[in-house]
Image: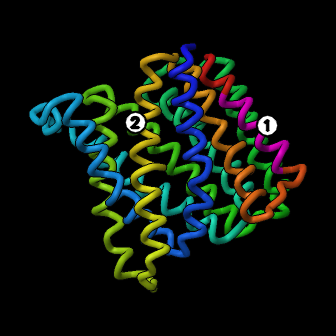
């Protein structure tokens, strides 16, 4: 693992871990916040994609359906994620949300005929237990926790459809098209939600689009030139640690023992899954 790749991956996870705070501080409805996030992040990702593969390759869209479905899931999972943050504490949301990658692996095993190993089964059980424990066995299954679960499911579908899309297209091109499609599907939220234009809200959305989305993705892709994908996937679970830490520092939210145990189980599930 080279030092540059490690630093870039830590930078990406640090930025992604602070995203919940940005969404909360924007005071924008989740759909509106996601719209502005992808709107201001997309131009940078688009430039990066075209620079990497060229304009002709970027517009080679066949098959288009995995690009379309993954783009829809990108927008949907973020809308659910930030909606859940407005309903319950950060720790509950991020712990449940990061069960999503395990769902992706399960779907790939079932529908893409990827080998279903004992490691995948074990990681799935651990992730499920992690979610159950984090919501106190269902006793504390609030509306926010339910929305976070929907975010996790759509996150899992995003990973699944993205995996299919990257079989035919460059990963960075897939991401660019996902951003473009997300702009389209979140545009109606500008008219469906009641919200007020505030400079603080829009500035936070711009910062999140440029730094927490475009820059973080650039750091992620560049880091993959220096470290293994499996190592990167494991390090991505640092998002949970950073998110809980930021929630404590800025929102004074202290995770309870159930959330801590749930987070540990889901992190272990992710480590086991990428080692299969």
Q: Quadrant of residue 251?
A: bottom right
Q: Is residue 43 left or right of residue 232?
A: left
Q: Furthest residue to the left?
A: 56
The structure residue drawn at horizontal position 39% and vertical position 46%, both measured from the top left corner, is 214
Residue 115: percent from the left, percent from the top?
Answer: 53, 17
Give the residue at mark 1: 264
Residue 220: percent from the left, percent from the top?
Answer: 46, 32
- Tell me how many marks there are: 2
Is 264 covered by the magenta stretch? yes
State the residue in front, 118 or 235.
Answer: 235
State the residue in front, 229 or 130.
Answer: 229
Q: Is residue 210 left or right of residue 98?
A: left
Residue 87: percent from the left, percent from the top?
Answer: 67, 71
**Label 2 residue SS:** helix
Q: Furthest residue to the top?
A: 1
Give the residue at mark 2: 218
Our reading of the magenta stretch's main secondary structure is: helix
The structure residue drawn at horizontal position 13% and vertical position 39%, both measured from the top left corner, is 59
Q: Quadrant of residue 269?
A: top right
Which range is magenta?
259-270
Residue 139: percent from the left, percent from the top?
Answer: 85, 62
**Classed neighbour count for the residue bearing mark 2: other residues with Cα under 10 Å, few (<14), some (14–19), many (≥20):** some
Is 171 covered by the magenta stretch? no
State the residue in front, 257 or 147.
Answer: 257
Image quadrant where one finds the C terminus: top right
Image quadrant where one finds the N terminus: top right
Q: Earlier in the sequence, mark 2 or mark 1?
A: 2
Q: Is residue 181 left or right of residue 22?
A: left
């Amino acid at each position: 693992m080279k030092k540059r790749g490690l630093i870039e991956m830590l930078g990406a996870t640090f930025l992604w871990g602070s995203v919940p705070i940005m969404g909360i501080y924007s005071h924008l409805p989740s759909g509106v916040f996601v719209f502005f996030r992808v709107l201001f992040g997309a131009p940078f990702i688009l430039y990066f994609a075209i620079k990497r593969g060229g304009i002709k390759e970027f517009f080679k869209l066949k098959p288009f359906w995995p690009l379309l479905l993954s783009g829809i899931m990108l927008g949907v999972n973020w809308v659910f994620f930030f909606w859940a943050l407005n309903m319950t504490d950060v720790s509950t949301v991020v712990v449940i949300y990061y069960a999503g990658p395990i769902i992706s692996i399960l779907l790939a095993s079932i529908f893409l005929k990827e080998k279903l190993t004992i490691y995948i089964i074990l990681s799935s059980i651990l992730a499920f237990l992690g979610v159950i424990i984090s919501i106190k066995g269902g006793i504390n299954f609030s509306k926010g926790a339910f929305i976070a679960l929907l975010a996790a499911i759509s996150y899992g579908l995003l990973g699944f459809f993205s995996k299919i899309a990257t079989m035919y297209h460059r990963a960075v091109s897939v991401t660019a098209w996902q951003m473009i499609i997300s702009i389209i599907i979140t545009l109606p939220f500008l008219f469906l939600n009641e919200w007020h234009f505030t400079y603080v809200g829009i500035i936070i959305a711009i910062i999140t689009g440029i730094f927490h989305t475009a820059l973080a993705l650039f750091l992620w892709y560049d880091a993959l030139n220096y470290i293994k994908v499996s190592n990167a996937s494991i390090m991505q679970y640092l998002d949970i640690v950073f998110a809980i830490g930021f929630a404590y520092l800025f929102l004074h939210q202290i995770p309870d023992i159930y959330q801590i145990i749930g987070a540990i189980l889901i992190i272990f599930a992710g480590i086991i899954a990428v080692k299969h």
